[in-house]
Image: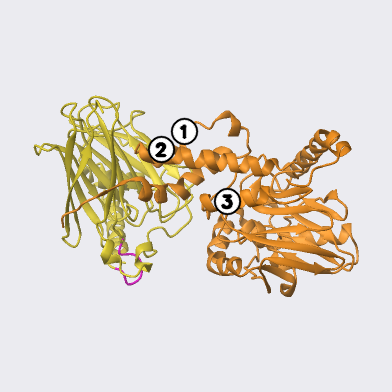
Amino acid sequence: MGRLLSKSERLSERELSRRQVLQWAAAGCVFSGFPSLANAGKLLYPLTASKITDDTWAVYGLPEYFSSENGGHIVNVAFIDAGDGIVVIDTGTSKRFGEALRSLIEATIPGKPIIRVYNTHHHPDHVFGNQAFDRQTIAGTAEMRTALERDGTAFADNLYRLLGDWMRGTDTVLPGKLLAAGEETVGNRSFIHTPLAGHTESDLLIQDSSTGVLFSGDLSFLYRAPTTPSADLAVWLSALNAMQAMDVSMILPGHGPVDPKGESITQTRDYLIWLEGTLREAVAEGLTMNEAMALDIPSEFSGLYVVRTEFERSVVHLYRQLEDEIFDGIEVTR
Amino acid sequence: MKRKGQGFKLFVLCISLGLSGVWSQASARDGELPPDPFRSVMWKSMADRFFPDGPIVFDGHVKVIAPASAEDQFHVPVTIDASGLDNVRQIVAVADLNPIPNILTVRPEQAVSFVGFRVKLQQSTPIHVGVQTNDGVWHMGGTYVDAAGGGCTAPAAMHATENWMDTLGLTKAVARRSDLEHARTTIKMRHPMDTGLAAGIPAFYLSNMTVTHPGGELIADVDLYEPISENPTLTLLPKMLDASSANLHVHARDTEGNEYDFDVLVPSSVE
């Protein structure tokens, strides 16, 4: 976090972040009373826009895992009023989510076209709302597009199983525009693109140079355990170091409240270091995956949302590769 | 497809036995089959096929640990811990709703009644584990795993590599002393474990593994079946003869007659 907050900003930091956490929790309360599958066909996402700074709104997801109750409303997306039109960061979990997001944008800033949609990475909770937007406005990296083309069908299969009717009509839509490292002017603002990797094979950071807000996708999480289905932990840790060196005013992580202090970077880094160390030790001891899944989670992380679920998933994601790395090679006679 | 046909014939046979009133003679078991706590629709069929020759009791000493929801239907981790039972003859694990239900059978001669492995699941299914003691009684345990479909009908990942035959049988292992009398060994062998249910790929799997002490005494004898995950990874807890280091010998064979022999070094307990 290069750019330091002014003294008065720093004084209000604590209150600010508490307010945001409360807003975030409030979104959850509204959501918990939502219709279940019994109302199939009437499923609607209760999206609300929270202004995080000038012309910039976050739409917070719940700190949960996918379920038929939450419809996959577990991810943060955002939109920015760029004068001539609207810029959108990630599109949510389903066609319906994308449509709900469009309605929310229209209700918040009526009458403006959507002129740019960024996909931070290819995971389904971030890109399956793409269908609700003009494909030519959707931008992502070439690697992200390749990954989505490869995994989209499998992601959709899995989400239809987990979410049911919320996914009705959802299909993969690839970005129509490819991005590399650089800066682009959209409307009256300019956005810096920093392609990194580690959470997936391609993770794109988007920074609004007018406000200094960094949209970190899933390279950083806050108060919610990081997910690892496509992760390369060493690459991810170096991406976090690169983020740490950036000059930003605040971070909107892919999951969790807005982060004015860079806490999401340190929290994600600390968790990943603990995760890798713990799994390496478990593999070296010859523990079964089930035994590893039951290991204690230290108090530093035990308060993170869905940490037990994500830790168990991470064992499945990471264990086999660590075995190949750590186990002794054995000479075999055939 | 052949197996489905056989399943159907078995089904017809069961029906006709039921209709002709000779159902009780179909099983050698004395007494009633206890109700299944996992409420499997296949429970009677599983019990008659895999646990036919003794009384069945559901027993909390048979712990079957698997995730409630499978993150990856090709690699669902399962640990069976029946270390609380003495005089164990064999441990038999089955996935009721898999197209091929047999997963594995372990005969722990000089090993704790414990095994860890991973399994491919074709759909959400109960897993039943019977641990038969020397008195013939089947001590049952189990669990239920929710899984996405298709674990048994997709080609193994290694078929996507340049030449999978090059690395067939490549083995890695870790062996530790857990205490003076016991070791913990995890053995991982590279093998596609083809089920025969993926289009154009015949069944080809590692079918047996024996682990012996340096003097030849049997530690454990394991039969593996098609649903065991690609690159089978087995965790066993051998009972050691003394505190010194020892090369445990492993002999494995697959369904094409390949034989694999190797040693796994267990360090001495004083290291």
- Per the image, the residue denoted by label 2 is A282
Residue B250 left/right relative to A90: left
Label 1 close to label 2 by CB (< 8 Å)? yes
What amino acid type is highlighted by mark number 2?
Answer: Ala
Looking at the rendering, the stretch of residues picked out in magenta corresponds to B195-201
Type of residue at label 3?
A: Ser
Looking at the rendered image, the quarter that the C terminus of chain B falls into is: top left
Secondary structure mostly seen in magenta is loop
x 64%, y 41%: residue = A266
Q: Which chain is orange?
A: A
Q: For the residues tagged 1 and 2, is the chain the same?
A: yes
Please name which of the two marks, 3 or 1, marks the residue nearer to the observer.
Answer: 3
Whole-angstrom CA distance, mark 2 to mark 3, is: 24 Å
Residue beneath disc 3: A238
Residue sitting nearer the eye, A61 or B65: A61
Give the labeled residue for mark 1: A295
B125 left or right, relative to A132: left
- Give the chain coloured yellow: B
- Identify the element where label 1 is drawn: loop
Circle 1: residue type: Leu
**Which chain contains the residue that carries disc 3?**
A
Question: Secondary structure beneath disc 2?
Answer: helix
Q: Is residue B122 visible?
A: yes
User: For the residues carrying marks 1 and 2, which lies nearer the camera in this image?
Assistant: 2
The image shows residue A219 at horizontal and vertical percentages of 63, 51
